[in-house]
Amino acid sequence: NDIRITLLGLGDMGTALARTWLAAGYRLTVWNRTAAKAEPLRAEGAAVAATAAEAVAASDLVVACLLDDASVEESLAGADLAGKDLVNLTTGTPGQARSRADWARGRGARFLDGGIMAVPPMIGVPESGGYIFYSGSREVFDAHRETLAVPTGTSYVGEDAGFAALHDVALLSAMNGMFAGVCHAFALVRNEDISLKDFAPLLTGWITAMASNLGVVAEQLESGDYTKGVVSNLAMQVAGNATLLRTADEQGVSAELLAPYMNLMERRLAAGHGEEGTTGIIDLLTR
Ligand code: NDP
């Protein structure tokens, strides 16, 4: 394989990405601020550049996987990006990605942003279900499609350079809410004569079953009819919240993770939407 790639950043994620390209026979040039981290990869066949500018000069495709947006700007400050395809896999906000796209274009590069939906052990393991969201230049995505698919799956989500970050952050935000609920659930049962090892798969099964229904929320939002397909109406759910809160109290568990969500449910119910599910909460957050 004659394809050259430059990779900037050899943290846990960058190193995992690098190994997949080396294993697939790509001609990889790497650079890392702390040079020692490049030595194991040199032994595995990577060319090691002394500076980021030198690394950028080695390939037309430049991938950055650095800590944050500021480290991308700092690392690439002295590099000539003219004619390069810059693929930025560094986590940032949608706004940062859009600004970085303008910045890259201003320096003569085509720009593709990425949001990595995987942890390093999932990289190079197709059955792990990991993938990377991409947005920005469709030409860059199409030109390097096979190369980008080597470390993990790919999902192109639009020409707006901010969309990969937006998808990434939306999924991570949902994950936070889910783990908040999981923390509360474990807090309820941890001091009882209940096997936590047996409890965990029950939690996984329940969360998975409930999450399979999210298409209904999307349909409700798109149609504007929030009563369509409702199986657990808001009035019933708010009544049920009293049981959840009383149980927390009986178990000596703080309800502080549940309270903000329950408050929003009550506000929506008080506004006369008892026949809906919880989709109306999205209006309270965004309007
Ligand atoms: P690490 O903390 O392991 O590595 C950070 C990398 O950024 C190192 O190469 C570090 O260099 C470099 N760096 C930090 N600051 C600067 C700077 N000012 N100038 C130049 N280089 C700098 O992080 P990861 O490799 O795990 O993560 C990299 C990116 O991937 C992040 O944006 C992260 O959000 C994203 N990501 C990571 C996941 C994970 O689970 N690890 C999952 C999904 C996304 P040095 O070695 O010199 O410190």
Image (spheres, rainbow, N blue to C red):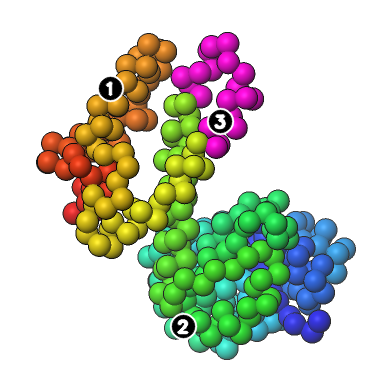
The structure residue drawn at horizontal position 25% and vertical position 62%, both measured from the top left corner, is: 223
Residue identified by numbered label 3 = 202
Query: Residue 34 location in percent, x, y?
Result: 70, 57
How far apart in space, not on screen, are marks 3 and 2 (Cα)?
50 Å
The residue lying toward the viewer, choosing from 19 and 266, is 266
The structure residue drawn at horizontal position 38% and vertical position 65%, both measured from the top left corner, is: 95
Q: In this view, does 222 lie to the left or right of 29?
A: left
The magenta segment is: 186-205
Residue identified by numbered label 1 = 242
**Is ligand 1 less than 8 Å from the beta carbon at label 3?**
no
Residue identified by numbered label 2 = 105
Query: Residue 218 location in percent, x, y?
Result: 34, 58
Q: What element carries label 1?
A: helix
Query: Residue 83 location in percent, x, y?
Result: 57, 88
- The residue lying furthest to the right in this view is 43
In the displayed structure, would residue 276 be above or below residue 43? above
The residue lying toward the viewer, choosing from 137 and 248, is 248
Q: What element carries label 2?
A: helix
